[in-house]
């Protein structure tokens, strides 16, 4: 057991736990008592690994980025989660959870979504497994992310617009939890990031850990060593970063860097989503972590140009790793992320998701030696962000 892993009560240091309404306790306990048994079962693993390979398209490439390497004076490799089916790492988790739900005898899935990426991943695996799917999405997001709404509907999901609060991700999450409370017997709630009550953060991290498992074997093959000197990922709730760091947290030779969305900067919390820098300790969506809130403890609406990073909380594992100094967390502004996205596009021919561009934007802020091996996880592809890119860069009519 590592000093960085979750303890038996579901805490990373003082962060984590399960702060839930009594009515949900049975569901959460059912998950907690079964998830490790199920995940470690060889039959489960056989099905999961097979689908990761044949359906998600894994292993995803580890690509040596030659021109970027030259520019930044190190050996830079990109872990290409953008090549996953549906365009991001989220499918790894959605697939793992639906297989687990099926083992628990569930027939109905609920999920929350902000930008719609997790909703699409969930609707996708529900189509695959022939399960009923209800996705809760803030009304504002339904309008902003209409293409993803139509994808979910085509996949057979019911998309429920949520009109409470700011009508965004936090409100969609509240509704999904409410639904789960009312339908505890037949329903499983697929959370889209390494957040939520114990055991979700650990469960999601395990499903995403395939990312660092593959980096290890791919690095070994390509460089003769199975670990990098520097490992970079972006953090919204923290699932792609958790998967990227998972098999390396105990190797202190590997420096871990997490990019938070600083939006317009750190001066005004209403124009930022840098939860680890600006948040205070509190409880959000079932766990204790760092949370963006005002003086009265009210959750505030964060801001980032990237729809996938503007969550007012952060997974407890990342709050902990930052607190004990295992990770270095860098705030990245909208402009820095957009500049990095354009650079990656022009230099390597890869249009990243704006979320992923936050990870790339850490490169100019770090000091490398010529032989250093650097791995950056590209969590998703940029197709969904083309409107934002086109407006920002004035790409023309
Ligand atoms: C959702 C999303 C993120 C943020 O979620 P994490 O749980 O922090 O990984 C990052 N990148 C992409 C492409 C996403 O879709």
Image: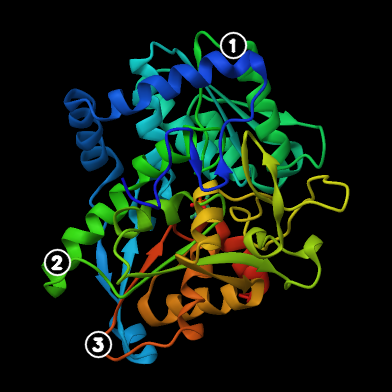
Using a 10 Å C-alpha cutoff, classify the residue at mark 2 as few (fewer than 14 neighbours), some (14 to 19) or many (20 or more): some
Q: What residue sits right under mark 3 in the picture?
A: 371
Q: Secondary structure at mark 2?
A: helix
Q: Which badge, 1 or 3, comes first in the chain's sequence?
A: 1
Judged left or right of residue 261, residue 199 is left
Query: How far is disc 2 from disc 1 in space, using C-alphas?
Result: 47 Å
Using a 10 Å C-alpha cutoff, classify the residue at mark 3 as few (fewer than 14 neighbours), some (14 to 19) or many (20 or more): few
Query: How far is disc 2 from disc 3 in space, using C-alphas?
Result: 15 Å
Q: Looking at the picture, does residue 106 appear above or below residue 15?
A: above
Q: Which mark is residue 220?
A: 2
Quarter of the image for residue 220 reads bottom left
Q: Looking at the picture, does residue 7 appear above or below residue 180?
A: below
Nearer-the-camera pick, 214 or 381: 214
Q: Secondary structure at mark 3?
A: loop
Q: Which badge, 2 or 3, comes first in the chain's sequence?
A: 2
Residue 272 image point, x, y percent: 72, 64
The residue positioned 51% from the left and 73% from the top of the image is 341
């Amino acid at each position: 057991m590592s000093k960085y892993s979750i303890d038996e009560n579901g805490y990373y240091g003082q962060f984590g736990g399960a702060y839930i309404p009594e009515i949900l306790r049975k569901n959460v306990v059912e998950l907690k008592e079964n998830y490790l048994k199920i995940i470690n079962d060889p039959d489960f693993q056989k099905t999961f690994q097979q689908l990761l390979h044949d359906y998600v398209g894994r292993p995803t490439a580890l690509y040596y980025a030659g021109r970027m390497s030259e520019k930044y004076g190190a050996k830079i490799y990109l872990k290409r989660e953008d090549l996953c089916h549906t365009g991001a790492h989220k499918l790894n988790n959605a697939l793992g959870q639906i297989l687990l739900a099926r083992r628990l005898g569930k027939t109905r899935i609920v999920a929350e979504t902000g930008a719609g990426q997790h909703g699409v991943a969930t609707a996708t695996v529900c189509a695959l497994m022939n399960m009923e799917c209800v996705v809760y999405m803030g009304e504002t997001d339904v309008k902003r992310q209409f293409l993803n709404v139509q994808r979910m509907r085509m996949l057979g999901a019911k998309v429920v617009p949520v009109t409470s609060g700011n009508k965004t991700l936090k409100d969609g999450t509240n509704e999904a939890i409410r639904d789960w409370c009312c339908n505890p017997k037949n329903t499983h709630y697929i959370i889209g990031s390494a957040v939520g009550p114990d055991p979700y953060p650990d469960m999601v991290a395990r499903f995403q850990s395939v990312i660092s498992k593959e980096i290890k074997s791919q690095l070994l093959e390509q460089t003769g060593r199975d670990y990098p000197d520097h490992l970079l990922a972006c953090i919204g709730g923290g699932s792609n970063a958790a998967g990227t760091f998972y098999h390396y947290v105990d190797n202190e030779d590997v420096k871990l860097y997490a990019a938070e969305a600083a939006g317009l900067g750190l001066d005004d919390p209403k124009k930022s989503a840098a939860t680890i820098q600006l948040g205070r300790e509190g409880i959000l969506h079932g766990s204790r972590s760092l949370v963006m809130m005002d003086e009265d403890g009210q959750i505030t609406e964060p801001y980032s140009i990237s729809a996938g990073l503007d969550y007012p909380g952060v997974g407890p594992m990342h709050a902990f790793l930052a607190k004990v100094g295992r990770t270095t967390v860098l705030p990245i502004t909208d402009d820095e992320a957009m500049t990095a996205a354009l650079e990656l596009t022009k230099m390597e021919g890869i249009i990243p998701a704006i979320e992923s561009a936050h990870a790339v934007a850490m490169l100019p802020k770090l000091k490398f030696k010529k032989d250093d091996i650097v791995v950056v996880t590209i969590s998703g592809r940029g197709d969904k962000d083309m409107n934002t890119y086109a407006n920002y860069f004035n790409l023309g009519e």
